[in-house]
Image (tube, rainbow, N blue to C red):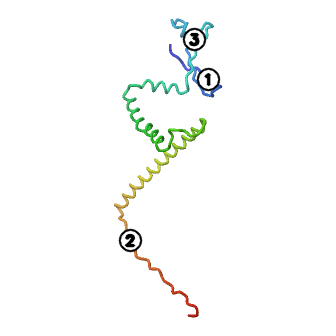
Amino acid sequence: MPLTYHRLNCNKSTGKYLRCYQTEGNTCVHCPNRPTCFDKSGIRRRILAGSCYPAFYRGHQRVGTPEFYSMMRLRKIWAEGSFSVLKREHCISKIRKRGISAATEECLLAVMALNLKRMVRAIFNKLKIQFMWAEEVFPRPSFSFCQQVQTLTAPKVAGLRR
């Protein structure tokens, strides 16, 4: 029997929203599995799932397909590589702060630092390419540096007037 989306429930203790799925009552009248879905009082069973269950289900359906393997290959390159850089260069393998919010803050600051480093590297690489192109079009003028000669002043001698 198909489960349809019924409503959105809010869990009061955690504050998270859960999707409530259930079958329509008239579709289960002649179903042989009716005793397992309905309890003795006749109330149908509800299935609560997380708010991102539809995306999870779609992703689970892709497992084993060529699209899945190409996505996993890209994930290994980008996501896992970023985690290894964070662990190696930003010491995220051990969190130094206590509490979820403080640990989240530490991780976000490390990720921001990594993104800033990547952004600066990308800007400098682009500037370097533009600078190299400009050198080919407009060669640098050659400057020859001349020695600077300091002027010497004669020491003042007492009794001499000019």
SS for tag 3?
helix
| Residue at horizontal 49 percent and vertical 45 percent from the top | 115
* Mark 1 residue crowding within 10 angstroms, few (<14) / some (14–19) / many (20+): some
| Residue at horizontal 55 percent and vertical 22 percent from the top | 49
The image shows residue 70 at horizontal and vertical percentages of 38, 32
The image shows residue 55 at horizontal and vertical percentages of 49, 27
Q: Are marks 1 and 2 in contact (CB under 8 Å)?
A: no
Query: Which residue position holds label 2?
Result: 143
SS for tag 1?
strand
Q: Which mark is residue 25?
A: 3
Q: Is residue 145 left or right of residue 95?
A: left
The three-letter code of the residue at mark 1 reads Asn
| Mark closer to the chain start, 3 or 2 | 3
The image shows residue 137 at horizontal and vertical percentages of 35, 61
| Mark closer to the chain start, 1 or 2 | 1
152 or 31: nearer the eye?
Answer: 152
Label 1 to label 2: alpha-carbon separation: 75 Å
Q: Are marks 1 and 3 in contact (CB under 8 Å)?
A: no
| Mark closer to the chain start, 1 or 3 | 1
Label 1 to label 3: alpha-carbon separation: 20 Å
The three-letter code of the residue at mark 3 reads Gly
